[in-house]
Image (spheres, helix red, strand yellow):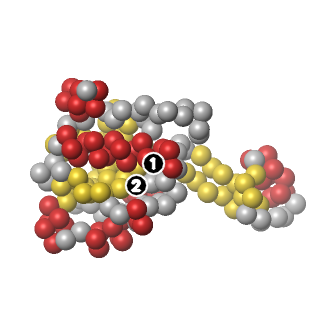
Amino acid sequence: GMSYASWKWNGGNNLGGYNVKYGAYCKMNAQMQRSRFWHREFGGYLMDDGSYVKSALRHSSKYHYDFNGAYKDLDAIQIEHAVSRVHTHWTTDNTTYYYNGQAISAEEAYVYQDIGATVTQKQTYLSFSPEDKALYGNTMLLNRVGGGLYSNWGGTPTTTMFSDVFLRFFLFPYIP
């Protein structure tokens, strides 16, 4: 149906220059849907044959995907054939401010800072975060509007963005 058409004719079979099998595309698409619903980052590894190895849920959290832990779950053959890390970003570019552990508005943050109070902040990213770019090798990102491949193998780092090739049907669009 729609999933096959999106994979075959909308570019889902080639992400960032890597061929992707239909089953792998479906797994990544499902992870993006779950990511958006559960507000968690999910991930795995794209293999050189176009298949996809999903990583365990224990490596997932709200704003971070633990590739160090996920890598330890791969066997020797999978490690040899992995061509890219893959993970989701469910949110958009945003800064959230906190005072005493409670989320506050930017205006409130400025008032608290003016009186000398400690205000912390959490930055979220639609695209590649500085943490993503610190990983060596290829990192593929799937987000709300498309995705991209960041590579820092060897020479100058490159970023290749791709248009939305995944199905974005979301039953509850009123949930941020």
Q: Quadrant of residue 80?
A: bottom left
* 111 lies left or right of 154: right
Residue type at mark 1 is Ser
Q: Is residue 155 above or below residue 10?
A: below
Q: Quadrant of residue 169?
A: top left
Q: CA distance from mark 1 to mark 2?
A: 6 Å
Q: Nearer the viewer, residue 57 or 68?
A: 57
Disc 1 on helix, strand or loop? helix
Task: Write down the residue under mark 2.
Answer: 42
* 78 lies left or right of 103: left
On-image quarter of the C terminus:
top right
On-image quarter of the N terminus:
top left
Specify which label sits upstream in the sequence, 1 or 2. 1
Q: Is residue 24 above or below residue 122?
A: above
* 106 lies left or right of 141: right
Assess disc 2: are there few (<14), some (14-19) or many (≥20) residues with their C-alpha within 10 Å of its C-alpha.
many
Q: Nearer the viewer, residue 171 or 89?
A: 171
Disc 2 on helix, strand or loop? loop
Question: Residue 120 location in percent, x, y?
Answer: 69, 62
Residue type at mark 2 is Phe
Contact? badges 1 and 2 (CB < 8 Å): yes
Query: Residue at the location (60% across, 33% down)?
Result: 174
Q: Is residue 87 visible?
A: yes
Task: Write down the residue under mark 1.
Answer: 35
Question: Residue 91 location in percent, x, y?
Answer: 52, 45
Q: Is residue 155 visible?
A: no
Q: Quadrant of residue 77?
A: bottom left
Q: Nearer the viewer, residue 164 or 17?
A: 164
Question: Residue 40 location in percent, x, y?
Answer: 49, 54
Query: Residue at the location (47% across, 33% down)?
Result: 170
